[in-house]
Structure formats: structure tokens, C-alpha cells
Image (spheres, rainbow, N blue to C red):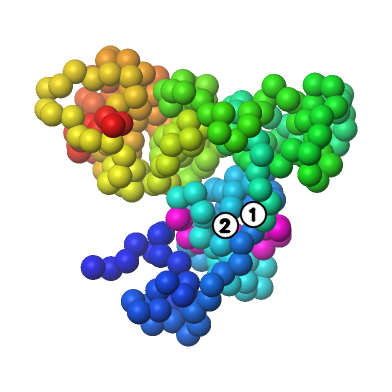
Amino acid sequence: MTADRRLTPFNGRVAHVSLRATVAAETYVEGTKAQITAPLAEICATPAGPRDRQLLLGAAVLVLERRNDWAFVQAEADGYCGWVPGNALGVAQVATHWVAAPASHLYPEPSIKARELAALPLNARVTITGADGRFLQTAAGAFIPAQHLRAIGDWAKDPADVAASLLGTPYLWGGNSRAGIDCSGLVQAAYTACGLPCPADSDLQRGSLGAPLPEGAPYRRGDLFFWKGHVALALDPETLIHANAYSMNVAREPIAASIRRIDAQGEGLPLCVKRRN
């Protein structure tokens, strides 16, 4: 069986030491812990190649190789491997808080009138070292509105609620934020905000999330609908939410109508419907 390159810490030249007995690499390394320091960082199959996914501020990674301006990494949260811009990496820190709003801003001072430094996505992780009024201060000396943050471990309760908070977000292949998101990015964002492990791509999600519903079983909130290359989340027995290229955004759609439409487009019927255990 061919290893899935997305989950295999091997780039054709350098491999993690755990693969010494299974892949032929020029070099085997332990890797170096680091974290994403940009609000969003593209993770690509090759340096400067097409985007596979995005990693968010504060994401913990293991750096296996640096080559020119790029670094080959494996994400700690979901095991995803690929190349990220080297200038998007910094020293690993222990995150204390996560962005619990659909999006937020990073400010140079504790004032909503200050020119923002950057936009922050849902699930970005930060290390908070102090407070100033209605703002919390990061270890880097920047400020974030306190109401947009929650402590690590203080998770949201319902993935469907989180997904609904991103309604209207524009569709973006491989996107993972309010600035642009795809179907599996939406599900991963919803699960991550609830402290639940979740792979990055829809085929990986289909293989690991939940248990299949028997044919004809009634749907309920939180059920996952899987097509080949697509995933959607039930909001109620009649309605789903998904990031889709038909409406080009995160949208609600009647389940029955969505199944008919996708089948009529030649994509077939759902491969399965799964429910979180």
C-alpha cells in the first residue's frame, strides 16, 4: 500500500526517524518543534506549489527540513505534512488561548481605534501574558479583544453552531478561515473549536469521524454527509450547512435538495452519512 503523502513525514529526501524502516530517505531527522507565526500560512505539496491547506497562527509543527525560503513540516494537530514559507515559522510556545470568534484582529495597542496589525482566524492560538482593559496582551506585545478569546480547554460545545457562525464565508479551495474556506476546512474548524480531533481533508474525515448511519435512519444535528471529495454538516433533520462551489460560500441548504442537486451535477449520491459517537 502506498503511504498517503499528506500524512507521511517524508519529502523524497528527508524523513522523520520513525520511518527509518519503511522509507528510503537520504537523511532521517528527529525534527525541530516550531509554531506558525503568521495569521495564515499556506501548506503545499512542493515549495511554492499549489495550496493543499492552511495552517493558523499558533499551530504547532515539527520542522523536518528547511530549503531556501521554505520548510517541510508536519502539523501536530492533524499530522498533515507539506511545505510552508520559512518566514511563517517561529519558536514554539505553549498557547494559553484560542480565537473563539469567527474572526478577530491583532492590535499594536489596547484600542479599537488603533490600526490593526493583522486579521486573526477562528481557532488561531496565542500565548497571553497580561490584560489591559478589554484587551488581552500576547507574548509578542500585541493586543486582542478579550471577548474574542477563550482559554485552551474552554471549548465550544456544538460543531454545528460553530459552522453556522461562518455562514457567508467565501469558498476557497484549501481554505481554513473566515477569509475563505472549503468543505473540509469548515468541518475541521467546527470540530477544532469544540476540542475534537479532525483530519484536514474530506476523505480523511470520512475514514475517521463517527459511525455510519443505517440506511433510512432519520438525520439529526451534527450528522456528516460525505460525497466523493465533499462533506456537509447537518443543522437539523432537514437542513445542512457546507462550504460549496455551487453558491461559492458557506451556505444552508435543504438536505434533500442538496442531494438531488449534487447527483444531477454528476457527483453521485452521498457515500455515507456518519454520526459522532
Answer whether residue 173 is visible to the viewer in this image: yes
Answer whether residue 250 is visible to the viewer in this image: no
Amino acid type, residue under disc 1 in the picture? Gln
Residue of label 2? 61
Q: In which quarter of the image is residue 143?
A: top right
Q: Is residue 88 magenta?
A: yes
- Say which of 82 and 136 sits in front: 136
User: Residue 26: x, y in percent?
Assistant: 48, 85
- Say which of 5 and 141 sits in front: 141
| The residue stretch that appears in magenta | 79-91
Which of the two discs, 1 and 2, labels the residue nearer the N terminus? 1
User: Residue 60: x, y in percent?
Assistant: 59, 52
Q: In which quarter of the image is residue 216?
A: top left
Amino acid type, residue under disc 2 in the picture? Val
Q: How far apart are marks 1 and 2 (CA)?
A: 6 Å
Q: Is residue 129 above or below residue 14?
A: above
Residue at 66% x, 48% y: name it.
94
Image position of 133 (left or right of 69): right
Residue of label 1? 35
